[in-house]
Amino acid sequence: MNKKNMIYLATGLVFAIFAVCIAYVFTEPSQTPQKQEAALEEQDASQLTAQNTEQKTPSAEALVFTAQENAQAITTPPAEQEETKNTENTTANLPMAQNTQAPANVVNTVNKAESTAQEQAAVIKDKGAASVQEKKLSEPKPALQDKLPVPFVADSLKTRTVLEPKKNTNTIVYAELMMDGNQVGLVFEGDKPIKPKTFRLNNPDRVVVDIDGYWVLKLPQIISNRMVKDIRSNAQKDKTRIVFDLKLAVSSSLLYRIHSRKYQLVFK
């Protein structure tokens, strides 16, 4: 090997060693994970120690209201038992002027809190009453009870008819004839609200019921009795009439409203 090649080889080795050293310096981790965790723990511990050192125990004067600090809240002592006892002893040894100020301020605060609570309770009560009233108004009104105004005895003579409502036609869907001694009753109900009226005619004696409008109806069968001779009906465009032909004159005839679609006629 000649001298020139030896020089090239030596120069290459030097550069190679230099590159390895630089690579090692820049690629070696500064710290291992264990070392990093230990360093963080030491840093946290030092910060906690510094914070504990900087914290000061609250003075006794800070625990009591003064005349200039009425609007401020009472500072509570630390939760530790020993510091609480020391604070109570220190407060007991304060001058009488300061001790008399604290209860008055506390009483004022309590009175304000009580008045505020009473006002809130009154507001809640008013809201509750209003909601109950709204609920009552929003609830649908109950339908009138299906109870006959004039009750008839259980063994009264009764006949009835029932019709199915017809489309586009007013229909008396229920009719019941009741007879009890000298008293006669007719209950009739329409599939829509009805507007009836009643009156009496003489020579011959009759009881008449007129219903506004044209109504399809079927009257109950007459049972043998001493008051009613016959019952008939006539329907026209503007009026439907029911007529009782009587054997005897009647002293009264009344029409009772059960609900908007149901009525009871009673005469005697």
Image: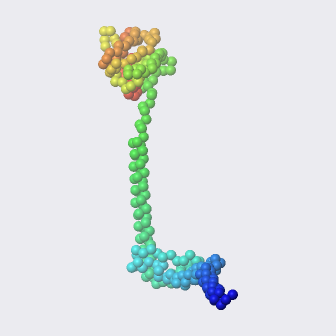
Along the viewing direction, whichever of 33 and 182 lies nearer the viewer: 33
User: Colour mode?
Assistant: rainbow
Instruction: Report x, y in % for residue 162.
Output: 46, 19
User: Quick check: can you spot residue 203?
Assistant: yes
Q: Residue at x 42, y 24 (%)?
A: 150
Q: Residue at x 52, y 84 (%)?
A: 54
Residue 254, quarter of the rendered image = top left
Instruction: Report x, y in % for residue 250.
Output: 36, 15
177 versus 99 height, above or below: above
Along the viewing direction, whichever of 32 and 132 lies nearer the viewer: 32
Along the viewing direction, whichever of 115 and 84 lies nearer the viewer: 84
Residue 241, quarter of the rendered image = top left
Q: Quadrant of the N terminus?
A: bottom right
Q: Quadrant of the C terminus?
A: top left
99 versus 149 height, above or below: below
Report the side of 40 relative to 100 (left or right).
right
Residue at the farthest right position: 1
Q: Residue at x 40, y 28 (%)?
A: 259
Along the viewing direction, whichever of 237 and 141 lies nearer the viewer: 237
Q: Residue at x 43, y 82 (%)?
A: 97
